[in-house]
Amino acid sequence: MPKHKKDTQVLIVEDNLAEAELLMYCLKQKGLNKGVVHFDQSEEALDWLFAREGFEDRKGIAYPRLIVLDINMPRISGLEMLTTIRNNPDTSTIPIVILTSSTEARDIDVAYAQGVNAYIAKPIDYNKFSTVVEQMGIFWKNINIPPRDSQ
């Protein structure tokens, strides 16, 4: 279970620990790791986000400014999680980036139809991955102006 952070800026939902650690490392290298929380299970991430099932002490704490979500998750897929987040009025405007290995047209189409803000295919090459993470982090944490109700 991740540490509680009251100032969570980025919620990462990725079941592959090596990829999650690489993502967090790349964010840290660029100074973009303030307030990052990682979950390897969609259910636990949803419980954390909605302050339920052991995370009740999060009630009233601000939502993250960005959710980075993998599609290929066990039990609850990333697309199902996306739908759950978008269907809740309290979380519907949180920017969500899908960072996944899937380049299937159906996944891309469904993700955008369900309200994803960006869809990124994970590069296999470390340097390309690092560059993508840096660009994503800079845009969503430093350039993008989030919806007023999520600040």
Image: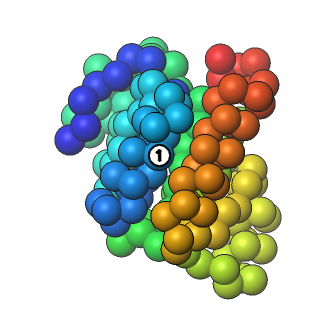
Circle 1: element type: helix
The location of residue 13, given as percent across then percent down, is: 43, 53
Check disc 1: other Cα within 10 Å, few if <14, some if 14-19, many if 20+: many
Q: Which residue is mark 1?
A: 26
The answer to whether residue 89 of the structure is visible from this angle is: no
For image coordinates 31% across by 62% down, the residue present is 18
- Horizontal side of 14 relative to 27 (left or right) equals left
Q: Is residue 9 left or right of residue 45?
A: right
| Placement of 113 over or under 101, stated as above or below | above
Measured from the top left, where is residue 142 in percent x and y? Answer: 69, 26
- Residue 114, position as x, y percentages in the image: 72, 60
Rendered position, 42 above or below 86: below
Q: Which quadrant of the structure image shows residue 108?
A: bottom right
Considering the image in quadrants, where does the N terminus appear?
A: top left
Q: Is residue 147 left or right of residue 14?
A: right
Depth check, front residue: 88 or 121:
121
Question: Could you say which quadrant of the image residue 132 lies in?
Answer: bottom right
Disc 1 residue type (three-letter): Cys
The residue that appears at 29% across and 20% down in the rendered structure is: 57
